[in-house]
Amino acid sequence: MNEDEKVQTLYADILDSGGIVSVIRQMLGDCLAGVEINGFGSGQNYVHIRAGQGASQVFLSLEECCFLFDFWIEERKLASGSSANLQDAKASIARWLSKGEDVDDLVRTFPFVSRK
Amino acid sequence: MHAGKVAVAATILRRGGGKYLYAHANPINRIDPSGHESLVSVNATIGIMSYLVMHEVRGGRAALVGARGMFGSNDGVDSIIYGLEVTEIIDEKVGQVALGTAAVVVGYKAIRYGIPALVRGGLKLGRLISQLAKEANGGRVVALGLDARLGQFADTVDYTFFTDGSKELAKWKAVFDRVMGNANNRFVFILDDVDVWPRVQRAASGNKPGATDWELLMIKENPQWRDRIVWTLEGKPVPNPFK
């Protein structure tokens, strides 16, 4: 099974919704002021989210249905997380970007997030 | 990794006997302070050394001699991987100092600290490298990513990593173009600690891009390369971020 087939198999719902960029825009666009959501090409496999000095990325695992995401301030990665539920990524990223980028708060609130 | 820190050629020597033969067997204390980014070639076909000497790498024989001298053991070096620039680097180092002295390797980065995710992913990465080596069909498997992560990656897959300390992006671009231009070569791009979108934007704007920034931009703009590249993050394969 090639890469595209794996993505199609593992993330059919994401692809049906237009790819990870489109889905994250739908999830975060309305709840975060000043957020920039970007990706490459068709936006299928990767998304970058930035608000102020904070930023996050979301990748898709090819081993299983699992979203890999991270948390940055000014180009420094401070934490990362993973979950099979995209809502977990959305909730943690929204908190990261809206609550002042507090790593302690993030790790305390979300058990699937760990400090770098 | 900060913008403006750029890479030059690097190579990996197959490690023998389970002993760290670089940095005078003292990799923890002898760390390259420059922290630059780089490329690592992590595998080669059997006999690549003689191939390099005969067909491709000027000074390859000297590099072999130099590498053996540097690492203090013939048995510890069973393949020299990568290209002309590396051999030039080795030659240069060998020319500067006596073989086998600590000074040879002080400037090289040789991180052996384990990163849990990479350790967990080590077996998978090793298999991945083996698979890519088969696909390479005489080409090489080359790892791309940030310097520190490449060192850890090399350690994980049982290769020794070292890199030159200079920072010539123009030279690096030439190396990269040549390596990418070989259709047999296969690539692993290690995305750990890589913020892809900002790096590509930085490279596209010409705002002091580092080597990794530039590599990402080139890969983005050359979709014909994509089937030869696999991407990993924390030891897990991930799909091409540019699709």
Image (cartoon, coloured by chain):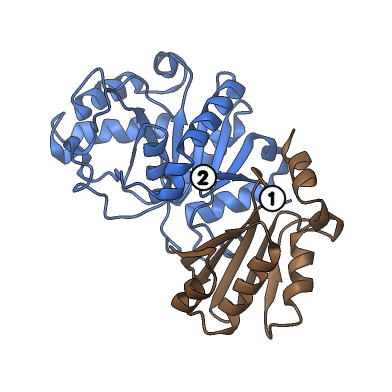
Chain colours: A brown, B blue
Which residue is disc 1 drawn over? A65
Residue at the spot 79% in from the left edge and 44% down from the top edge:
A9
Q: Give amino acid for label 2.
A: Gly
Marks 2 and 1, how far apart in space? 15 Å
Same subunit: marks 2 and 1: no
Nearest the viewer among B86 and B118 is B118
Q: Which chain carries label 2?
A: B
Q: Residue A81's x, y, as percent?
A: 55, 62
User: B150 left or right of B241?
Assistant: left
Q: Quadrant of residue B24?
A: top left
Closest to the camera, between mark 2 and mark 1, is 1
- Quarter holding the N terminus of chain B is bottom left
Q: Residue A101's x, y, as percent?
A: 51, 79
Q: Residue B34's x, y, as percent?
A: 30, 55
Is residue B32 something one can see in this rendering? yes
Question: Relative to residue B100, is residue B73 depicted above or below?
Answer: above
Residue lying at the far right in this picture: please name it: A16
Residue at the spot 27% in from the left edge and 44% down from the top edge:
B108
Q: Secondary structure under badge 1?
A: loop
Q: Give amino acid for label 1.
A: Cys
Residue at the spot 68% in from the left edge and 61% down from the top edge:
A85
Nearest the viewer among B191 and B165 is B191
Which residue is disc 2 drawn over? B235
Is residue B171 something one can see in this rendering? no
Q: Residue B217's x, y, as percent?
A: 62, 53
Question: Relative to residue A109, is residue A8 depicted above or below?
Answer: above
The circle on residue B108 is none
